Amino acid sequence: MKQFLILFLLTCSAYGQSEYPQDYFRNPLDISLVLAGTFAELRSTHFHGGLDIKTQQKEGLKVYTAAEGYVSRIKVSHFGYGKALYITHPNGYTTVYGHLKKFSKRLEDYIKECQYEKESYEVEMFPGVEEILVEPNEVIAYSGNTGSSGGPHLHFEIRDNQERPMNPLLFGLEVKDSKAPYVTAIFAYPKDENATINGKNERTELRLIPRKTGDYMVEEIKAHGAIGFGVTSNDKQDLAPNKNGVSNIQSFFNGNKSLEVDFKRFSFDETKHIKRYVDYEYYKSKKSKIQKLFIEKNNPLSLFKNPYDNGYVMIKDSTSSVYKIRIRDYHDNETWVTIPIKGKLETIKKDSIDNITTKSLVYSNKPTTLTSGFVTVNFYENTLYDDTYINFKVSSDTLFLGEDRIPMQKNFYINYDLSNYKSEHQEKLFIARFYGNYWKPYYVTSSRKGNVLTAKTKALGTFALATDLTPPTIKPINFQDKKWISKYRYLKVKIEDDLSGISKYRATVNGKWILMEYDYKTNTLTHDFNDNIVKDTKNELKIIVTDNVGNSSTFEATFFRK
């Protein structure tokens, strides 16, 4: 063990990370790499941190360590990566394997010991360098669909020694891709009130003209002043129909590079700023992501390389210019978009100015507090990217706080003073959010201190107080009270809560805690009798399930096993 540690430290020091080692990491599966998701692909709230590898729509495929090393982290959670494994390698990189169905036997035994010790399904462990060594090509787990996975697949990452995810394809992993990225829309944006695009001072969609070569032309635009461009583009690989992300975007103005967006590496601290990179308002209203090829203030993304004038271009009157966009996937298949621009100074017809007298100004660089009646909303410094006018109105216990079309850097806080509510009623109240025309309350993470109920969220919208008086339901799936279940390996129970949602659960047999895995997608709790905790013939099962406002239900049953 000590020899491995010395070798590990020496190898880390010798390798450095100035280049990407080739032929060091293997494909973590036995099948060819076919991707459902690519690195840095645009997700709703973040850039994708790895590769989503298809597992032939099945669970249970063997997952191999990509190289030798040691298990440096194990995390089991209901959401996120679900069951996830982290392996640190002698060259300083760490590989991550997520949404696993289960771990190899020795890892499963190690994890279950921790789960039973802590009496919790959700655990996180950080084994030492010498504690769990793994060999090359060792089976470490089996692929699954745990956590916030939308279907069976393996999430695979490679991180550098600063825990920054990198594109795993940089390390020699092979994916068949001979198809160039494609473009579905092009937009132009005025930088300020003095800029015009086709006579307007607003985001303008441009007419896209596909060419036989696979590239695109845009119908000539008339513009003046400082403008930027945005593109909606995706990539497809040879063996899958998925709409994947691209690898690199460059823009050129009259032959000179204006901006480059390079999706090789990013940090988790910055991934939330995808809301600043895409046109968030357009995404929330049209469900399409425009990648803005210009850098607005408060956008710290490291993906931008050597921007000139933050990607904006200056168009002067009576000039002819050409703006080009080069879009590439990882395999250097590329697509070009050409935008001819005629400089023309035009008088903007002013539309009626939005009435801001009913709105409240929220500052981006200092705290802002909005108050009406017994409702207070706190926006702390740097919550918003820009100073913004937001609709703010309180009617009875309902808060109307604009629409979710303004990007937030971090949470803001909604506070309800419950002093006028009886203490026994306060306990069952929560802050709910309502979507669209569906007047159904959705629980927002809430906490109460004294008479003040507080919820935190990153999305504007309509909120109100809601009451949950109904406890969760608990129903057996594969057994009945006072019946023999000797032939069953698993004990399964369905738990549901139709309002505030499940907060926690606890199961015991004959007074002893048992591990039950919670799958929120199917609302099931499952115990594996192979844990060898249940050894008696007659067994008294007790399950307590609690929702997010403290309502709880208790289920009790007797079962028999030989």
Image: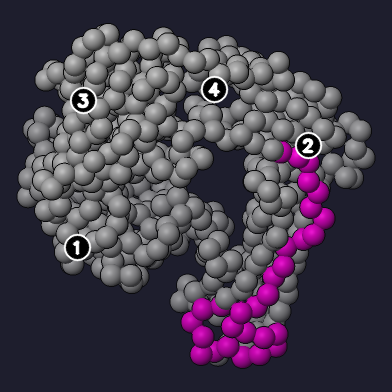
Tell whether label 3 touches label 2 (CB within 8 Å).
no
Q: Distance between the residues labelled 3 and 4?
A: 38 Å
Identify the image quadrant of the C terminus: bottom right
What residue is pinned by disc 4?
Answer: 383
Look at the image and say whether residue 438 sits in the magenta stretch. no
Q: In this view, does 75 lie to the left or right of 163?
A: right
Q: Which residue is drawn at 36% across and 21% down?
A: 197
Q: Residue at x 11, y 53 (%)?
A: 178
Sequence order check, earlier mark of 3 and 1: 1
Tell whether label 1 touches label 4 (CB within 8 Å).
no
What residue is pinned by disc 2?
Answer: 398
Amino acid found under the numbered disc labelled 2: Thr
Q: Is mark 4 on a helix, strand or loop?
A: loop
Q: How far apart are marks 2 and 1 (CA)?
A: 50 Å
Look at the image and say whether residue 483 sits in the magenta stretch. yes
Range of residues picked out in magenta: 463-491
Amino acid found under the numbered disc labelled 1: Leu
Q: Is residue 264 above or below residue 488?
A: above
Q: In this view, does 403 lie to the left or right of 261?
A: right
The disc at residue 239 is 1
Question: In this rendering, which labeled residue sits more in front, label 4 or label 2?
Answer: 2
Decide which of 128, 169 is in the foreground and name it.
Answer: 169
What residue is pinned by disc 3?
Answer: 340
Q: How far apart are marks 3 and 1 (CA)?
A: 36 Å
